[in-house]
Amino acid sequence: MNCEVCQLKELDVEHFEIREVLRCILHTILFHRALGLVRPKDIDLELFEITYVQCGDVELERKIDEKIDQFIDRVEKHPNKKNQVIIICLSFYEVKNKQATWFTNKVERLHWEQWYINLNVAQHPKGHLGKSHSSKVVVDPGDIATEARSARRGALESSLRDVLFQIIRFVNEKKDHVPPIPNLEGVSFPYEITISSSSDSAFGMDMFKRMLQTGHPTMLS
Amino acid sequence: MDLHGYPQAEHGRFEQILNQFLLKSLHIILDSRVPANRPSSRGGEIKKSDKWFNLALGDRPAAMDSLSFWNRSLMEPMIIDIILVQESPNSSSTDMFTETVVERWIVQYDSQRSLAPQIGDASYKKTYKKSIILLRSVYSTLRLLPAYKAFRKQSSSKQNCNFEINYKICSFSSPFSREEEESMKKYSFTPVDAQQGRLSVSVIYREDLSDFNLDAFVSCPLEIITDYVGSLLTDPMRAFPSTSSEKSRPTSFPIRGKQSNSSSPFQRPHSWTSGIHRDVSTQQSQPFSGSPPLYRSPSFSRLRSETAPMSIPHPMMARSPRYLSPNLSDPSRHSLPPLSPRNTKYDPSSHESSSGIRSVRRHDSLRAGELSNTPINVSQKLSRDAKEDSGRFSSLLSSSSSPRVGFSRSSSRLSFQDDFGDSDFSCPFIVDDVDPPDSQTSFLLPHSLNLDGRNSSDVSSQTSSTAKKSQDAAVGALVHMLRTAPPLRKDSSYYTSHSSKIEIEGEVGAASEFFKPRKTSDALEELKVYKEMKDILLSKSGARVAGKENTGT
């Protein structure tokens, strides 16, 4: 089984927009991949005029919010000085029980799909004049700042919409690699969410490891 | 469908999937475009028939109940047009509407005989799995297209909409004109391979709806009726009950200082208002806005009238719109909501509608006995309804000029009878090794396809008795309110309607509220109408209840 990868369009977001944007994207992906019985729930974003769909699974919501909190923590601890893109990887896998050997009793995860959400989080102004393009310079007359802000907001909304369409298109185009649906409600396939930055040294390692897991055994040689 | 070379069971299963796919996609599209006026049954057990494609949507929209699909062949495409209806700008009082197709959904099974047949039980399971994904993406896309905004606006503020959303389903459609096509975009979902063919869904939609000025706020001088009682034509009014009816708790109607305390409003026993009154009493401290219109639509989480100064809630006895409209000297196109004489059901919790075809229109809202202040002159609308609604969809097929009017007699029929009694039905295809459902019983059309008829008769008897009881109480409440109503004043009043029975879906829960100041002239008009109604009521009930003149100007 091959692993399909989808790189979502990069989004420039402000700190306070992270939560909504991530919720929207993650839930949209999961809605299309939670192929068990769901009761779809429509959620309106507050910051944008977009409505997305959730699975209606409370447990899922909780997990996603947890992940988002982690993400926000991380972003706050490591301010984005160099305009790094932070990547959230939502990966679906199948669990294959390996034969228990003397040394390992590992359960192998075969990733069959990966989504990369690329966020460029704007520098936190922190109240002083910053050189970052996103900081709201105090000296600016209010009107110009507001206009710029709403223009930026409008652009983000349009990009977010594009991302959602991107997800829908991908989900439609690639269907063959989806494993058979187990008899579960809601989220039918196990998934994991990992956060990394493009500059992470560990990031490359993660990618490599994942490639090993998903690739054909002969790839290792 | 060509059956050669296929095991019967396999083919039967596939037909079942196709049948259900068409129904489900129609359900999704209608739910997302046509404002429904029934309480959504989100809570509770999911019906087996709703489990198809692992997407539980709740009860089917009333519109689907009335569609006559019996003669539709599964092989024909299902074309759903979403139409925006607006009053023509050049007409003021005449009944001229412009209809624009803002979206056209085409769901069809393309039979391709050249496709190599896949024999084996994997094929229909794969088809099923892929169609689950397809339907999910259709669901999401419906929320991202421009028309969704219009739908939300309609759902949340019927009263202030200068447009209406309508729909049309047929198996073929006239192509768009060149200029229409230029303003429209097409999106095709990747088709799902199926036995000897493909299931495909595509949509042609208008990208830019700004021409329609959907956000325009429309003034509504006439406020509606707080407590709808019932149609006079269907349920002749009974004698007024004593005012101390069995209702226990007073509703808090316009609370205005000391006066409110003295009044003891009623709690109406209507099944659909029971929740409303329970809640309203908690709103004691809130100001009211005008005479609160009572929206029975489940999409309303609040009742607010946009126009302020009328603080008298004016329960309206049902009337024929033709009776009302001549009395309205209001040149505006708004009229008091007509209570369609065709409405026999007042219980929005009854999902099957006996009004059948009528449910096609947005006037579904009236079906459940609710009052919505429609932006279009309702009496005119109703006459339109009479012309057009009768078998709107079944006759729609025949109204076209094409000879291919979907009454083909092939053995595959789109069937609504998918319940087969919940006990028989097992949701197949979820697990790979699941036993195939009994295809013999499942896809062949049963004799009694009238899912509607079976259920509606149960419900109608129940609701009519409720309605009768409610009416008496309602009339009593009405009279009481008339007697004790405080004078008009400019305060905005606020009236919350939140039936506990009516579960508000998330997407429409965030209803936007509009307040609009009213002019005195508007209030005067309304007062006139109320006076007339009151007089009629009183005269009918005899001299038992002496109405007090409603003072205040």
Image: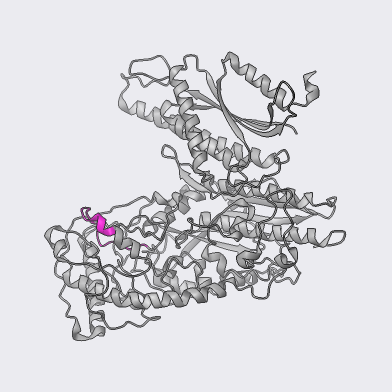
Residue B487, position as x, y percentages in the image: 15, 65
Residue at x-position 73% and y-position 29%: A98
**Span highlighted in magenta in the image:** B280-295
At which x and y percent is residue B261? 15, 62
Q: Is residue A75 above or below residue B280?
A: above
Q: Pick whichever, B507 or B88, lies toward us.
A: B507
| Above-or-below relation of A106 to B329 | above
Picture coordinates of residue A205 (x, y %)?
64, 17
Residue drawn where x is 60% and y is 63% of the image: B169
Q: Residue furthest bottom?
A: B542
Q: What quarter of the picture does the N terminus of chain B occupy?
A: bottom right
Q: Is residue A9 visible?
A: no
Tell me how the rendering is colored: one colour
- Residue A217 sits above or below residue B13 on the image: above
- Dominant SS in magenta: loop
Give above or below for B312 relative to A166: below
Tell which of B195 and B146 is nearer to you: B195
Q: How many marks?
A: 0
Quadrant housing the C terminus of chain B:
bottom left
Please say whether residue B286 is one of the residues in the magenta stretch.
yes
Identity of the residue furthest to the front in this view: A102
